[in-house]
Image (cartoon, rainbow, N blue to C red):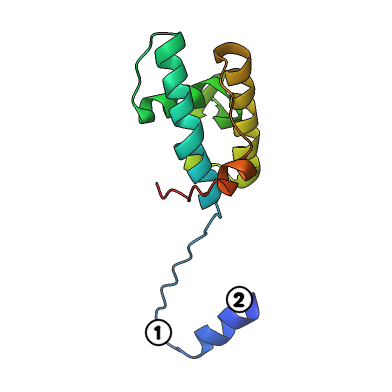
């Protein structure tokens, strides 16, 4: 991490020159372990429940999209200039860890209450030797 004094010192090394500085901000996002848990455990279990209980067929990506639509934890609302709100449904990978955990707890509750889906705790998921998933 650099501060303003470091930037000024750097710029002083290039007198009478144009300097282009590119700044990239990196958000830590969702951890690989939570991604693995979500894509290898939760999404397939919901996909199977939708097929068996509701007679609805979804791809894994379709199941993911349906789950994200159900949970307010994945919704970002921004005010419209004329009134009302625009809702954007965030991708799972765009959630930070605290948002991802809130989302997972919400859909686990939905699964238990409405679809008879039991989702194991992530610790037991990883104790069974399942690895992370890169998506």
Q: Give the labeled residue for mark 2.
A: 2
Residue 112, quarter of picture: top right
Q: Position of residue 33 (x, y in %)?
A: 54, 49
Front-most of residues 113 and 7: 113
The vertical placement of 135 against 117, above or below, is below
Residue 113 image position (x, y, % from top left): 63, 14
Residue in the foreground of this view, choosing between 30 and 41: 41
Q: Nearer the viewer, residue 100 or 33?
A: 33
**Relative side of 62 to 41, left or right:** left
10 Å neighbourhood of mark 1: few (<14), some, or many (≥20)? few
Q: Which mark is residue 17?
A: 1
Kindly state the secondary structure of the residue where label 1 is placed.
loop
Q: Does the image show residue 6?
A: yes
Q: Position of residue 25 (x, y in %)?
A: 52, 59
Q: Quadrant of the N terminus?
A: bottom right
Compared to residue 66, the image places residue 120 above or below, namely: below
Q: Secondary structure at mark 2?
A: loop
- As drawn, the label of residue 127 is none
Q: Position of residue 72 (x, y in %)?
A: 60, 25
Task: State the residue at coordinates (50%, 27%).
Answer: 68
| Upstream in sequence: badge 1 or badge 2 | 2
Q: Is residue 62 toward the left or the right of residue 124 in the image?
A: left
**Side (left or right) of 26 relative to 99:** left
């Amino acid at each position: 991490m650099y501060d303003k004094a470091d930037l000024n010192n750097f710029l002083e090394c290039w007198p009478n020159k144009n300097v282009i500085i590119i700044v990239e901000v990196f958000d830590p996002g969702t951890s690989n372990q939570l991604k693995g848990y979500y894509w290898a455990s939760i999404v397939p279990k919901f996909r199977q429940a939708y097929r068996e209980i509701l007679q609805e067929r979804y791809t894994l990506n379709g199941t993911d999209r349906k789950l994200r639509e159900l949970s307010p934890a994945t919704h970002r609302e921004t005010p419209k200039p004329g009134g009302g709100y625009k809702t954007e449904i965030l991708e799972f990978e765009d959630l930070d860890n605290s948002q991802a955990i809130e989302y997972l707890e919400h859909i686990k509750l939905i699964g238990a209450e409405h679809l008879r889906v039991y989702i194991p705790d992530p610790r037991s998921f990883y104790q069974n030797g399942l690895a992370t998933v890169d998506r």
